[in-house]
Image: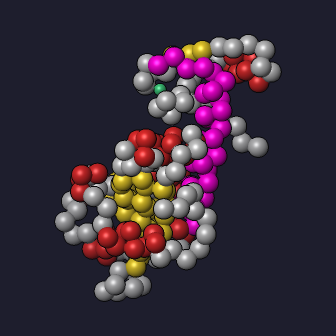
Amino acid sequence: MATYAPRCPHCASSIDVPESFLSKIKFWTHKSTANCTACSRTVDLHQATVMGDAFGRWADHFSQDLRKTVDELPILKNVEARRVIGTKVHDEDVRLLSSFEALSSTVLRQARQVLRDKSHGEEVLLDAAVLRDPASPQEAIAVILGRSAVSSGQREWEALIARLGKSEYVAYFPPIATGVEQRVREAIRDKKWPGRLASV
Ligand SMILES: [Zn+2]
């Protein structure tokens, strides 16, 4: 079984905990706290361990889903990729990622709030699907739609990912204010295979 770093139950940032503390928590013999360097709150280390495990499991689950999705993608030339992602997107807006691990960690950073809410048992949306270009269906990209819980304002974001090589990707995260494109909602809604982190 994988082990995961403890995380702050409030903001889901990882918490640095000395190994000696961790072993104490495991046996429930000692109650300890730490300060979260990200949100400055005092964190109960047992709760942080529970949060870290839940967050890590959901993150792994989504990462596997993302891998299946991007594995389905055709390898596109740069010009094709940019056309499907959107010709108004400038070079400085996209990220080039040279491995699936780099892509996954970039996406998981974006998804932190959603994964935090999900780890608290709240209803969220986080899903990836293949989107085919209606003009040339052999050209396809992956899209991700995320939505945080009601308690976090149900903030929605999207990501568009094209494959440029065997494990080489270009990813675009539009500004949240831009809103989610209709074609992204439709691709997520029409997704054929199961494996969802959560449904709408
Ligand atoms: Zn925190």
Q: Which residue in the rendered view is the most extreme toward the front?
A: 150
- Quadrant placement of the N terminus: top right
Residue 124: x %, y % from top left: 49, 52
Residue found at x 40% / y 73%: 186
Q: Is residue 19 left or right of residue 190?
A: right
114 lies above or below 18? below
Please say whether residue 162 is visible from this viewpoint.
Answer: no
Give the overall secondary structure of the magenta segment: helix
Residue found at x 43% / y 55%: 146
Residue 123: x %, y % from top left: 52, 51
Residue sitting nearer the eye, 167 or 122: 122
Residue sitting nearer the eye, 169 or 10: 10
Residue found at x 65% / y 29%: 49
41 lies above or below 70? above
Residue 137: x %, y % from top left: 39, 85
26 lies above or below 90? above
Q: Which residues are magenta?
A: 41-68
Please say whether residue 15 is visible from this viewpoint.
Answer: yes
Residue found at x 51% / y 16%: 42
Is residue 77 rendered magenta in the image?
no
Q: Is residue 40 left or right of residue 83?
A: right
Residue 20 quadrant: top right
